[in-house]
Image (spheres, rainbow, N blue to C red):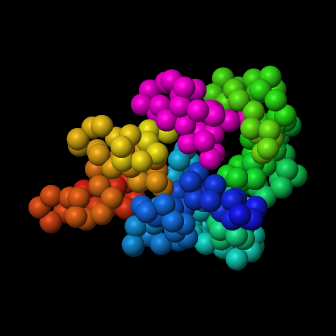
Amino acid sequence: MSRARIAAFGVCLFVGACGSDGHIDLGSTASGGATGSAGVGGTGALGAAGATTCGSSAQCIGERAFCELSSGRCVKCLIPGHCKESGKTCDPVVFECEDSCTQDGECSSGSKPFCEPTRGVCIECRQDAHCTSGDENRCLTTVGKCVQCRGDTDCSNAEKPFCPLSRNECSECLVDGHCPGGQKCDPTDYQCRG
């Protein structure tokens, strides 16, 4: 798998560019794509103007000023030089400025105590045992982040039995058929409405 495809997959998992089936969904909002506030620990990869896709960095403004071409998403950084804060580097999987490291001892942040040396950034976890606070007790190892779920089997609450891969958060529905009485599944938060 090429580095660009691995990076696109990481973006898919981290910023919510996946559809409910786990495939990359770039910019679809009406059909279930999570392009806004959905996504693991992020606010989506939208430029400040609300663009859902990009073909060049000229289309990206504000905090997410760079276009990651393989995914067509506005991101915070593409190269380490885009991270201006001392001790930060660009994570080549999620395109965020993170604490840089080569070993665990260099990760002093309480929330990200482990080093992912291949990416050169500090992460939350490498395995489920590292996720011990609240209801985010599963490690999404592809990005090193603690999440509620990696699949439906991780969701034991009968009211929220589904795990949309774009959010990794137990939810009420994935599709309209999961909703009672003609309600529709809202793809922005996977809740039954109306």
The quadrant of the rendering that contains the N terminus is bottom right
Give the residue at x 65% y 68%.
71
Observer-nearest of 125 and 127 = 127
Observer-nearest of 121 and 34 = 121
Give the residue at x 71% y 29%.
114
Residue 84: x and y in percent read 84, 46
Residue 10 falls inside the magenta stretch: no
- Name the outermost residue toward the bottom: 55
Residue 57: x and y in percent read 75, 70
Residue 125 falls inside the magenta stretch: yes
Magenta stretch, main secondary structure, is loop
Q: Is residue 123 above or below residue 7?
A: above
Side (left or right) of 130 relative to 176: right
Side (left or right) of 112 relative to 99: left
Q: Quadrant of residue 190?
A: bottom left
Q: Quadrant of residue 53?
A: bottom right
- Name the outermost residue toward the front: 1
Q: Is residue 32 visible?
A: yes
Q: Is residue 193 visible?
A: no
Q: How many numbered tags mark residues here? A: 0
The quadrant of the rendering that contains the C terminus is bottom left
Q: Is residue 150 above or below residue 27?
A: above
What segment is highlighted magenta in the picture? 122-145
Q: Is residue 112 above or below residue 117?
A: above
Residue 89: x and y in percent read 81, 44
